[in-house]
Structures are given as structure tokens and as C-alpha cells.
Amino acid sequence: MKCRAFLITTNRLENTKMVTPETQTQIAQLDKQIEELARKRIELASQEDNTKSSSEATLETRRYERQFMYSLSANDDIAMGNLEKTLFRTLFGLSHSYQASSGSKNSNIAEAIDNALENTPKIFPESAVVACQGIEGAYSQIASDKLFQDANIMYFRTFDGVFQAVEAGLCRYGVLPIENSSYGSVTQVYDLMKSHKFHIVRAMKLQITHRLLAKPGTKFENIKEIYSHSQAIGQCSKFLRDNQNIKVNVVANTAVAAQAIADSDRTDIAAISSPDCAALYGLDVLRDDVQNSDHNYTRFIVICKDLEIYPGADKASIMLALGHTPGSLSDMLARFSALGLNLTKLESRPIEGRDFEFMFYLDVEASIYSEQFINLLCQLDSDPQAFTFLGSYKES
């Protein structure tokens, strides 16, 4: 086992100053010793103690690590003490990860993935019945039309309706916004994930273009109220702060806002919505500089009731709960770090009815054909805490 991960801080110091050949030789010798000692330490920590129960052994290990880390605080050199803490936190985390990988695994994840790889068509479908939240002109509809060449779209008033439609088999796929580059996660969707069974089969990033729309002939100086979705309002917060005399109203969708303006007799209201909705509902663009950034993208996921894994899948999503114990999150992250896997998303949401306990959602860049990654999924699934493999997919 290679333990060079422990030498990150040493390498950084080496990169900032020149060392003599003699010093470099000594460093190389020390690196080898550290590798051998780390290997021995991890192997010893993995040996079972039949005189203690699993919980007793775990608590004893925790107590030892806590006391050891506390002893490092006595270092007079604060900078060096912090480096040592980082080193040993990493060592402890990798040790826990190695122990988990060596334990018995009781998981059906590997079999489910094998079945999905074998039974999923080799080409992502060009046409399908698709559920999305909103009405015609919504960004979810635009994303659906980009994902599917011929999408037969079923519209639902809420995100929950999309989940329920897929879960009940009313449609094969659902398209949902999951996060925005400038305003963050769509927390409503993450919260709903806890109560529905689904799998992610594809993802895409859609550039978002917000405009201020109003009925033809309306002047901006006459606008008293603006309607839009909460995400769009957040993405246009600077413009709205500069115009605090205008009342802001939250509605279910940006397309719903545009339709409401078109159907109203008032000429003092406007909607923050898309150029597509301006054309669709016969509205004028009053302002095209309302969003905080032109680099504004929303990530959409395609959900399905069954596990489908299409060729080119290079990203995976999982959902898990962790024990309410010190170090549980760092131990879990160390498992990914040990395999060199890059986490592109880590979102936490509170678990209803449990004080200070959270469900974690992770996106990871990983090949579904990697045996090491499959083994990691099996380890996580065999842990006593809740775990769900949400899917492996390609993102465009």
C-alpha cells in the first residue's frame, strides 16, 4: 500500500525551497521509512481483538485518537503542530478506510449494477414521456428538449409531483433542476430525494438567461411588482437590490410568472423569465441586464424509476447518513481520497425528526467499471447507516 498521501505537506515545503542532493537523499530515505511505518501501523490497526465487542473496540480507538490529537496541541511550534494534526488525521482516516475495505460485505449493489449494465440499451433514448415542473416555456422544459430529441412532456405543479409521476410509472423519466452556478443548490429537490425511490440516469448543464418581461408598451419606470421563481430571484438579487421600490412576488416557476403577466390586465407588473417565454407569451423585454452574472448555469438531472446505466457513464451520485460521532464525515471522505476519487458535490440536508443529524449527497467522478469503486459502494452499503446508490451517468 502506497502512503505518499501523508507527505503532502512535506512536498509543499520541498517545492518552496531548494534542497541539496544530500538533503534530498535523506528525504527519500525518510519517505521510505514513513511508507513502511504507515503500512505497519494500518496493518496493526486492522487486526481483530476477539476479547472486545465491535463497539468496544471502536470506542477504544476513538478515545486513543482523540487523546493523541490533543497531545499534538502541546507543540510549541503552532504551524508544525497543525501540520502534524493534518498528517495524523489523514493517517487515521485511511486506516479506518482500509479496515472497512477488509471487512465482510453484505451488499447487492454489485449485482444490481451488473444487471443494469447488461440490460440498459446502448444508446440513450431520443424520445420518451418526460415529467417536469412548471408549464411550457419553463427552463425544465428547455432542458427536456435538449436532452431528448422528441420529448412528450407532462407538466406538474411541484417538484414532488415529478418524483411521484416517475415513482408511479406515469412516465419513464423526470427532469429536475438540482443546482445553479450562482445561487447554489435547489434545496427543495434535495429534501424530496429522502422520501422517493429513483435513480439518476443523465445530467446536463443549461445556460440560464433571465430577462425582465412585460406586456407590450409597458415602461420600466412604471413597474411596481415583479414576479418570478425563488431561484431566479436569487440569481437577480443585485438588480432587485438596486430597485427596492419594486415589490417582489415568488411564484412556482419563471414560465408561470410570464404567463401571469401576459394574462393580466395590469401594465405595472413584470416577470423575470426567459427569452423563450417572451416569444411564447407575446411579452416585451424591458431589461436584459437583470441577472447577477452572464456565466449562469443550472444543472439538471434526469431521474428514472429503474437503475439504468448508459455507455459513457463517468459520474455517480450517492446518498447516505452518518453516525452522530466525531470523525464520521472525515472517515467517509478518506475512503474516497484513498482511491483518488474526486468529489464534485457534497450537500448536507437535515434529517427531519433527528436533532443535528444530516443526510449527505455526494457526486463523484468515477468509472462504474472500476472494481475498486464497486467495492467502495459495497462497503458503504454494508455500513449500519442509511445508504442509497442514486446512479451512474454521463453529464453534458
Image (cartoon, grey):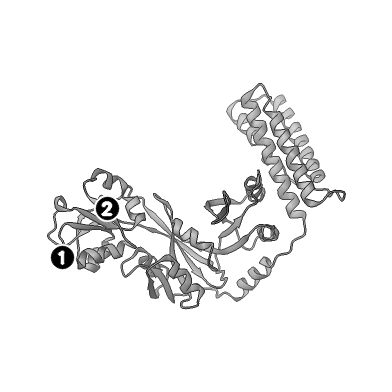
Q: SS of the residue at dot 1?
A: loop
Task: Indicate the amino acid at tag 2.
Answer: Val
Q: Residues within 10 Å of mark 2 (few under 14, many from 20)?
A: some
Between marks 1 and 2, how big is the CA–CA gap?
A: 18 Å
Lower position in the chain sequence, tag 1 or tag 2: 2
Figure check: 357 above or below 30: below
Q: Residue at x 69, y 58 (%)?
A: 384
Indicate the secondary structure of the residue bearing disc 2: strand
Residue 267: percent from the left, percent from the top?
A: 15, 60
Q: 235 and 165: which one is in front?
A: 165
Residue furthest right as drawn: 51
The vertical placement of 234 against 175, above or below, is: above
Residue 248, disc: 2
Amino acid on which the number 1 mark rests in the picture: Asp
**The label number, if any, that marks residue 129 in the structure image:** none
Q: Which residue is labeled 1 in the image?
A: 265
